[in-house]
């Protein structure tokens, strides 16, 4: 009865990113990974397009560039936030205190993860000195760090953008969900631990005999992006980046008449 998509060998590399790190990543999540990825394929861009990110802009639509000193060397950064609330808090709690006149002219602007990727690629071509930083939700970083330590991984801080994936322990297979029409099933990679837990609990109720064989794996977004772009495994195209509940509500608010995203259904893929 049980036949699930297996990506153990492919995502084993992505899954190790949070332990080994990648060259150049430093304290700026993901920048080293982005430099290592070739130009995205159409399907990769499409997957990234489904995830919103948020940044600050002035009335002309220009990004807010912040400067700071790092070891006596000035660094210019533009922040892109996974959470709209985090972007708003950064504006309200920091910028309005440091420069209220400037902050009063700024707004939180939504883009997509694909837009962020393209901005970084263009920056490289122009030898731009500005660093474009993707900022994770700290609650999810803490959840990822805690889960890794509970599983025996000694991690002080998760450096990157955590994703949470319900999976099976024995054969490195992953829970799948249906999306939209048709019978095809996909592997959800969640930006929130709570979403992954909810799907896994639903599956355990449906198939209680498999409960002890399930777990949630923590992987890094940039390792997944690299695997999506470079892997020859056809199953890698089954990965779906599932936005946070906050982001899903934001997307729905932009298109209230549009059908909401399909609710994840915790059922195993049919055997082929």
Image (tube, helix red, strand yellow):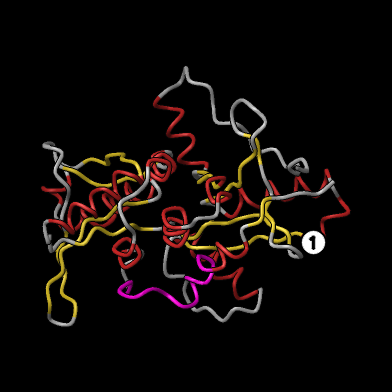
In magenta, the rendered stretch is 13-26
Quarter of the view holding residue 34: bottom left
Where 20 sits versus 192, above or below? below
Closest to the observer, 158 or 47: 47
> Is residue 15 within the magenta segment?
yes
- Estimate the x, y position of residue 181 in percent, counting from the top left: 61, 25
- Estimate the x, y position of residue 180 in percent, counting from the top left: 59, 28
Closest to the observer, 124 or 233: 233
The crowding category of the residue bearing disc 1, from other C-alpha atoms within 10 Å (few below 14, some 14 to 19, many at least 20), is few
Residue at x 75% of width, y 42% of height: 272
Residue at x 81% of width, y 49% of height: 2
* Left or right placement of residue 196 versus residue 86 in this view: right
Residue at x 31% of width, y 40% of height: 111
> Is residue 138 within the magenta segment?
no
Closest to the observer, 166 or 144: 166
- Estimate the x, y position of residue 190 in percent, counting from the top left: 55, 50
Where 12 sits versus 152, above or below? above
* Left or right placement of residue 54 versus residue 95 in this view: right
Instruction: Residue at the far top: name it.
Output: 257
* Left or right placement of residue 118 versus residue 204 in this view: left
Residue at x 64% of width, y 27% of height: 182
Q: Which residue is mark 1?
A: 213
Closest to the observer, 212 or 233: 233
């Amino acid at each position: 009865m049980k036949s699930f998509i297996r990506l153990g060998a492919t995502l084993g590399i992505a899954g190790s990113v949070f332990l080994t790190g990648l060259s150049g990543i430093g304290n700026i999540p993901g920048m080293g990974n982005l430099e290592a990825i070739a130009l995205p394929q159409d399907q990769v861009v499409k997957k990234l397009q489904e995830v919103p990110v948020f940044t600050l802009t002035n009335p002309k639509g220009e990004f807010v560039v912040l400067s700071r000193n790092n070891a006596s060397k000035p660094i210019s950064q533009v922040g892109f936030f996974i959470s709209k609330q985090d972007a708003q808090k950064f504006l309200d709690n920091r910028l309005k205190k440091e420069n209220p006149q400037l902050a009063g002219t700024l707004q939180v602007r939504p883009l997509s993860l694909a837009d962020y990727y393209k901005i970084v690629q263009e920056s490289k071509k122009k030898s731009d000195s500005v660093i474009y930083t993707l900022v994770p939700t700290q609650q999810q970083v803490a959840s990822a760090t805690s889960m890794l330590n509970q599983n025996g991984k000694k991690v002080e801080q998760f450096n990157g953008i955590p994703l949470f994936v319900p999976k099976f322990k024995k054969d490195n297979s992953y829970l799948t969900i249906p999306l939209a029409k048709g019978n095809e099933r996909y592997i959800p990679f969640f930006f929130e631990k709570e979403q992954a837990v909810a799907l896994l609990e639903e599956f355990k109720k449906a198939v209680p005999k498999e409960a002890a064989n399930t777990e949630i794996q923590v992987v890094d977004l940039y390792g997944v992006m690299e695997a999506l772009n470079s892997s020859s495994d056809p199953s890698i195209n089954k990965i779906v980046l599932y936005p946070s509940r906050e982001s899903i509500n934001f997307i729905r608010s932009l298109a209230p008449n549009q059908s909401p995203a399909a609710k994840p259904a915790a059922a195993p893929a049919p055997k082929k």
